[in-house]
Amino acid sequence: MSDSGWRSGVRDAGQSDAPRPVGRRSVHADSGNRLGAAHPRVEGPVDLRLVPPALAVWVTAAVLVGAAPGWVTGVAMVSLVAGGMLLSAGRADARPESPGDPAITLGDPAITLGDSAVPLGDPVRRRRGASAARRRGACAAWRRGGARPGAWPRISAAAVLLCVSAAAASAGLHGADVRRGPVPALAKRFAQVTADVEVTSDPRFTRPRITGDHMAPTALLFDAQVRRIVAADGTVLATRTPVLVIVDARSRRGPAQASGERSPWLSLLPSTRVRVAARVVPALSDGGDIAAVLRVRGSAPPELVGEPSGPQRFAGRLREGLREATDGLETDARALLPGLVVGDTARITPELDEAFKATDLTHLLAVSGGNFTILLALFIGPAGLAQRVERRGLAPRFGVPLRATALLGGALTLAFVIVCRPDPSVLRAAACGSIALLAIATGRRRSLIPALATAVLLLVLYDPWLSRSYGFLLSVLATGALLTVAPRWSAALRRRRVPPRLAEALAAAAAAQALCAPVVALLSARVSLVAVPCNLLAEFAVAPATVLGFGTLATASVAMPVAKVFAWCAGWPARWIADIARTGAALPGGGVAWPGSWAGAGLLALVTVVVVLVGRRLLRHLWLSVACLVLFLLVVVQPPPLTRVITGWPPPGWRFAMCDVGQGDATVLSAGDGSAVLVDAGPDPVAVDRCLSTLGVTRIPLVVLTHFHADHVAGLPGVLDGRSVGAIETTGFEEPPDQAEFVRREAAARHIPVTRAVAGERRRTGGLDWQVLWPPPDPAPTPDGPNDASIALLVRSSGLRLLLLGDLEPPSQQALLRSPAAVEVRNVDVLKVAHHGSAYQDPELIRRVAPRLALISCGRHNVYGHPAPSTVRALRAGGAVVLRTDEDGSLAVTGAGGGLSVAGH
């Protein structure tokens, strides 16, 4: 009998009276092999039984953690009693009336046993398979046929209620940890105490913030538990209360981070106990996972009273070795590689951090399931081959059996958590990996969705505060997207002839973005349009960077030269990822503003559903899909010629532009052919970079920084990145010192010379020439402050005369009128009003200058009231047209004389 006849005969005999089970497929009959499929796998419906309990635990913990004890106790008791009653009733109804011995139907030419199937061609295997199937069929029939209707829904509801009770109890206990002890009462009195605290996280610096014309000094902070307190009256109190410790370590040179020094506080490892003299203040928000904030002032090093644990010392040596091995790499690779491997973001600059946020690549800076998946795959091989003889990975190559592989994998998981720190994404990844390893050890495969639900349930019960963590939410959403949505989208793309690897990568990036975008928009009030392509392009470099990075981590403590070779190799893919982030963030249409509220998140979820539905239809029409892709690229890239035609910005022949950078200054003087002189860089690197890009500026012969206030210099990195800059010219009054040091450091990193401007200096480039009017050369009277030391320029451009006054205040404005340069400032065409249009202006200077056009750079709703109404009235009384960036946006001046005009954007 032929092979096809054999299959047909068995099918006829087996299917005459018993139909094939619904949802099953005859894998052996369809395999095309006489002996059946080599790796049979019969997929049933997705097991979602653990999803409702996991969601119930998550919602209960989020609502009740930190709630009043009465509510927590009531919910726990009511749920426990109701769940117990339902469970008892369900078990009584579930008893079979007559279990019997159900018949086994042979609907396929194989007896299906879970994930495997036994071909009927082998009599011995057939008998064994039939016996096993009979036992399993009997058990299934007991559950399915003997139970009365409604039994299993009652049991499922009981399980959910019992989980709610457990979550309420756990939330109540963790909430009590925050409220109990003397710390909350001391915080209400803002008491000064001496406390012994145990460090529970890695110390990290806050990101720099611009406050007015100053950059707020960075502070160092870490999570800790107060173990012992000595109050001001000498009372000694023992406790165990979670707090946040903020160290304001300041000196004349500024924070240690800014000056390049490594603060001794940064060397503290988790589990270290230190003694601090601090003021206890209330936490910023009630209901959080900390009881108070301990503010430590001064630059004294920490006083150690207890050494870190052995595992933490070992992990600290590994992390320090990784930092040392990457010291010689290029700046971005040096900063990014420790973040990719162990989540160490101490070297990530604010500009690189903003670029990763703009492209939704921040998940790469937080160690996630992807890192752990790569590490496990390296050890045990791909998950789909983990239990086969053909499995790959280091473990089978060294002859390690399955159960020993699971045990070693568990040890690897524990080491991963210790080295990378127990952040939400790390815990979720470790929990899912542990469940997968348990399946390998027991020989029982489990679906990954129940594994994810189990991980969520156990982790939230262990730490209910995770239920309020946006990082944990994003981690679970991304994982759920990869397990549920991505496979369907990947299959759909493959049906449309997309290559399998590309289809998988594209589906994974799109699915994760679709589910996570509403939460990201809630946090950032922005939607990235380049997230999917940037994640797709970065994905190809993540695995090699991670594997080589772990190689660097493992060898740094024993063979530093080998570790540096690994680090050098890992630096290339790390630089690729950083370049992708910077390029995507620099695109003019890379993102759009979005309401940062739950309503905005819901709206974005609705828009995402509509886009997916429309996209499915578009994929059926090739040319329409290509047209939409081209339109999307034009929106994102916004090529200057096309943008100029559509928006009219920048206007043809523009001479002078004032960028809308918020509460700060950034003015651009066109020198022709993509070249311009920049006066001040504003407070925000992203804003000034975007303005220069829309103006088409790629070369900057000179950057003039009128003075060192942060609202004029903090945006300098956005100016220097990706552009050719010839030199930087500054004032000679180097205050504030930390900002002067910041400018010198940024210039030195890019080998850009820094010069000093003095009155009388004249320069020319292209059709542009300018003269420095202020400050006067040495010896000069000491200015009252940085504002009075601002550089003032008189600029000429093809008959157009512009006066730029920086932030000069009345004393310097009056001195300027008494200087030889006074004859130069009469009757100018355009005036850049001093100090954002503040009330501190010299009326005589305004009358002498008599501008036709007065431009004011200021931020919307700024707290300083700029521009002052009195200043605006004085300018208009002199015949000037007054325009301001907070109302008119970026401004560009064209023409000269009678043809003078200005355009806004």
Image: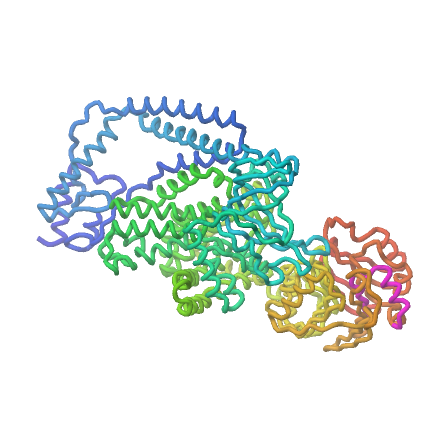
**Where is residue 74 shown, x and y percent of the image?**
48, 24
> Quick check: 578 left or right of 185?
left
Q: Does residue 624 appear in this view?
A: no
The single residue placed furthest to the front in the displayed view is: 234
Nearest the viewer among 311 and 395 is: 311
Q: Does residue 142 appear in this view?
A: yes
Residue 570, image quadrant: bottom left
> Quick check: 447 left or right of 729?
left
Q: Residue at x 66, y 59 (%)?
A: 254
* Residue stretch in magenta: 801-820
Height in image: 256 above or below 436?
below
Nearest the viewer among 62 and 101 is: 62
Indicate the quadrant containing the C terminus: top left, top right, bottom left or bottom right. bottom right
Name the image colouring: rainbow
Residue 563, image quadrant: bottom left
Residue 94, image quadrant: top left
> Quick check: 292 left or right of 130?
right
Q: Reply yes or no: does residue 450 show up in magenta.
A: no
Q: Residue at x 74, y 50 (%)?
A: 862
Nearest the viewer among 865 and 206 is: 206
**Where is residue 108 shown, x and y percent of the image?**
18, 44
Height in image: 798 above or below 102?
below
For the image shown, how many numbered marks are present on the structure? 0
Q: Reply yes or no: does residue 804 show up in magenta.
A: yes
**Where is residue 277 shown, x and y percent of the image?**
61, 45
Nearest the viewer among 726 and 379 is: 379
Q: Residue at x 54, y 61 (%)?
A: 584
